[in-house]
Image (spheres, rainbow, N blue to C red):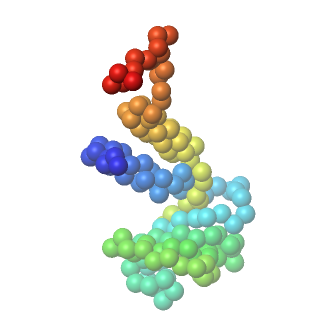
Amino acid sequence: MVVPSGRSRVAVALLTALGLSGCYEYVPMQRTMAPNPRVEVLVTDRGRLSLAPALGQDVLSFEGILDGRKDSAYVIRVAEVTYINRQTNRWSGEAITVLPDAVRDLRVRRLSKLRTFVVVAGTAGAGLLFIATRGLIGGGGGDDGKPTPPVNGQ
């Protein structure tokens, strides 16, 4: 059994972290976008107070699906809430109504081409490095056309 070295463990940890962060990023909301996008809502101080009964105390931000607008408010099906102490709670899509004065910033999740490239290139590079350092690709080089001498005179 091959035990990974310290460098191998670090490389695996970094690749795992990149993979877990996903290939997505949050960008400012635009006028034209797909229906029901995944959004991140950064909450104002006023919003922290007004959303406390629905989301809990000390909300920093939350993510979910933008279901639309009702009057001037946003209707969002909540997937995850992050609090000021950086703890998070997963939700199962309960809809809440958020007034515009509760929103400091509303960003839409989209696929990041750069992050995707980095993850794919990093994974491919790590795989090639692993193969090269373990000698898993045969180079051929041992057959010069001469017969192999017998072992122990046999």
Residue found 64% across the figure and 55% down from its top: 30
Residue at the outermost front position: 154
**How far across and how far down the image is residue 136, in percent?**
45, 33
Q: Residue at x 31, y 48 (%)?
A: 3
Q: 72 and 62: which one is in front? A: 62
Q: Quadrant of residue 59?
A: bottom left
Figure disc tally: 0
Q: Position of residue 28 (x, y in %)?
A: 56, 55
What residue do we see at 68% from left, 73% from top?
67
On the question of residue 97 being in view, the answer is: no
Q: Nearer the viewer, residue 27 or 31?
A: 27
Q: Is residue 19 left or right of residue 149?
A: right
Q: Position of residue 12 (x, y in %)?
A: 38, 49
Q: Is residue 79 visible?
A: yes
The residue positioned farthest toward the left in the image shown: 6
Residue at the location (42% across, 48% down)? 15
Q: Is residue 110 above or below residue 41?
A: above
State the image quarter where residue 98 is shown.
bottom right
| Residue 64 in which image quadrant | bottom right
